Image: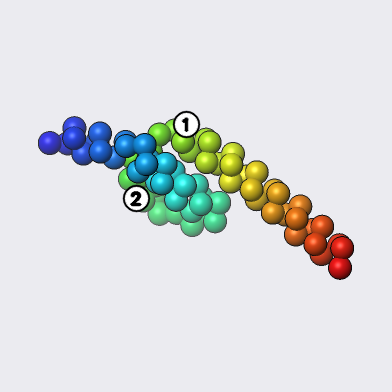
């Protein structure tokens, strides 16, 4: 019975969404250990790496845009 649940949890859409949520909470630094362990069982490590790199790029670009906006005024 646990095998179908595991396959369902590793579906591409669900795993990507869980990766996005996991990385977003990690950026904020607010994470329960139990939620961390639960998410680690559900997500693909490659998704986490891709989402983390994408999030970091968006964050840096956002900072650059904010600084340019503040300096331009």
Residue 67: percent from left, percent from top: 79, 58
Q: Quadrant of the N terminus?
A: top left
Q: In the rendering, which numbered label is found on residue 46?
A: 1
Give the residue drawn at x 40%, y 54%. Answer: 32
Q: In the rendering, which numbered label is found on residue 37?
A: none
On screen, residue 27 versus residue 72, left or right, reads left
Is there any visible trace of residue 2 in the rendered image? Answer: yes
Instruction: Mark 2: give few (<14), some (14-19) or many (20+) Cα within 10 Å.
Output: few
Residue 45: percent from left, percent from top: 44, 33
Residue closer to the observer: 73 or 6: 73
Residue closer to the observer: 54 or 45: 54
Q: Quadrant of the C terminus?
A: bottom right
Element type where label 1 sits in the image: helix
Q: Quadrant of residue 5?
A: top left
Instruction: Mark 1: give few (<14), some (14-19) or many (20+) Cα within 10 Å.
Output: few
Residue 4: percent from left, percent from top: 18, 35
């Amino acid at each position: 019975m646990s095998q179908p649940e595991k396959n369902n949890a590793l579906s591409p859409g669900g795993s990507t969404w869980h990766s996005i949520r996991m990385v977003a909470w990690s950026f904020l630094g607010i994470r329960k250990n139990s939620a961390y362990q639960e998410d680690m069982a559900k997500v693909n490590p490659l998704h986490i790496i891709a989402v983390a790199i994408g999030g970091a790029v968006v964050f840096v670009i956002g900072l650059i845009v904010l600084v340019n906006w503040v300096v331009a005024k």
